[in-house]
Image: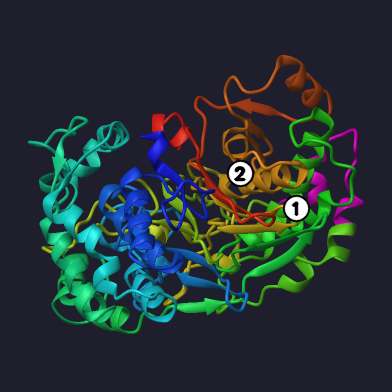
Amino acid sequence: MLALASVAVSATGADVPARAAIASAHPLATEAGYKMLQQGGNAFDAAVTVAAVLGVVEPYSAGLGGGGFWLLHRAADKFEVMVDARETAPAAITNSLYVDENGVPVPGATLKGGKAAGIPGVPAGLAHLARRYGRLPLRVSLAPAIALARDGFNIDSRFARIAKVRESLLLEGVNTARIFLDNNHAPQQGYLLRQPQLAATLEAIALQGSNGFYLGPVAQALVGAVKAAGGMWQESDLSDYKIVERAPVRFSYRGATIVSASLPSSGGVTLAQTLNILEQFPLVDARNPASAHLVIEALRRGFQDRMRYLGDSDFVKVPTATLVGKSYAHSRAASIDPNLATPIDALSITPLAAKSESYNTTHYSVIDADGNRVGATLSINSWFGSGVVAADTGVLLNNEIDDFSLGAGLANTYHLLGGAANAIAPRKRPLSSMSPTFVEDAKGVMVIGAPGGSRIISMVLFGVLDYVNQGKVDLLGIVTAPRYHHQCWPDVVEIEPDSFSAEWIAALTAKGHQLKPVNRKWGNMQAVFKSGVDGAAQAASDPRGFDMGGY
């Protein structure tokens, strides 16, 4: 499976260096995307196909009921854009649906059932990509996903393990047991999973574009199912949903040009600030103890400003230009002691609202022979989302309302803080850490991203640092290198198990850092690279994703 999940291919199929590359979290998605390239499609067509197939074969991570971001580069005119297909809050939403009169969160309200689901953006995103950027009709690019949903596929060990972890949710959910369980038990590896109702919804989109989802019978079924499950969707929430094209965050780091996701993803802004801070120091290797101290301190400051300022920029004023500027980073870098960790009190961290982001997302990267490229990170939030499959549509709905901040001082599982900028509001898009990113220098261009909630930002940060520090690009080395993570609050440095020596731990502890080894590795990074010298392409998938040792 690992060999198939990321492929680099020649446009001619001849024995010449590969010119195109695809890396995704599932070999069936990668294979289907490759076939679109063979059929004359470009990277954008392949991106439609890969996303749709992932929604069929990885329904626990992404799908028609979720949202995400596509970062695009069109080779012909160097045009770059972020296609924002993030979920939106329904018009009738209020904070009081999720907290009681004492300001205490209602258990499970943002995680399970109809109230947890935002208005999906993926179907609109697929139609938008095909119509505006692709070469192939939507019915062609969606055909592989339709076939896999209708005829079925044999689930892999990862699917089986995740279904076992979420077995109780699937048993208790709406229409989930009959689709994803085998006689009310988690299916075993090799189980043939058929989703004919999902195939019918995909066919409606293939024939009618986004209208096949946001209008008519599918939309009516979605609204009815959400209301029956306690939610407050209206048909106008669906008919009014719009894709937003946004200018990506663009900056430089040690001679490389970085292009990343813009708000409502916090990824690009936080990456820019963190890398701009690190540019002020003679960084050697992000995993050298002295350099690791600097990386942690830069992340501490980047995540502090994430808490303080970031949200949906259509609703709140965000000082983006300042936050991504070199002069601001210079002032932030001046506050770093190269020998000691900054006490959290010195940063004036007031617990605002602890907010979780799911680790259970998917990312894929595509670059074609012409140099068109796509980085896409998609999600339904936690594994199997809200546990609601909408009536006979086959669409498993997200629980992205959990990515909003509910109020001050509300701790939860992952302890990621958020503030008023990310408060719930009708039609607003919740803040995200999804960070599809391009890194380009004289060596060529890398497209990289990962799932992992707040850890996405630190993972992509390491990818950038490792790429820039390398002479010859070792893509597999980039996606497999050991990881640590710091997000300002709580004031702990998470480290992957069995990845750092006792001496490394002792050196950072001596500087005042509190290190916390976690029980499993995290991430499922997908990266592709195209050489700027000879045009050769390569792809690499993170092996953590295949053994489910990580999130």
The stretch of residues the image draws in magenta is: 331-349
Q: Earlier in the sequence, mark 2 or mark 1?
A: 1
Residue located beneath label 1 in the image: 274
Give the residue at x 40% y 53%: 381
Disc 1 is placed on an element classified as helix
Q: Which residue occupies the extreme left position in the image?
A: 183
Q: Residues within 10 Å of mark 2 (few under 14, many from 20)?
A: many
Give the residue at x 13% y 77%: 217
Residue 479 can be seen, yes or no: yes
Residue 433, above or below 543: below
Residue 456, above or below 3: below
The answer to if 337 sits in the magenta stretch is yes
What amino acid does circle 2 point to?
A: Met
Q: Which of the two discs, 2 and 1, sits closer to the camera? A: 2
Quarter of the picture holding the C terminus: top left
Query: Magenta stretch: dominant SS?
Result: loop
Q: Residues within 10 Å of mark 1 (few under 14, many from 20)?
A: many
Residue 311, above or below 56: below
In the rendered image, residue 436, in percent from the top left (x then y), is placed at 55, 58
The quarter holding residue 257 reads bottom right
Residue located beneath label 2 in the image: 459
What amino acid does circle 1 point to?
A: Thr
In the rendered image, residue 199, in percent from the top left (x then y), is placed at 16, 61
Give the residue at x 26% y 69%: 140
Quarter of the picture holding the N terminus: top left
In the rendered image, residue 363, in percent from the top left (x then y), is placed at 46, 52
The answer to if 539 sits in the magenta stretch is no
Coloration mode: rainbow
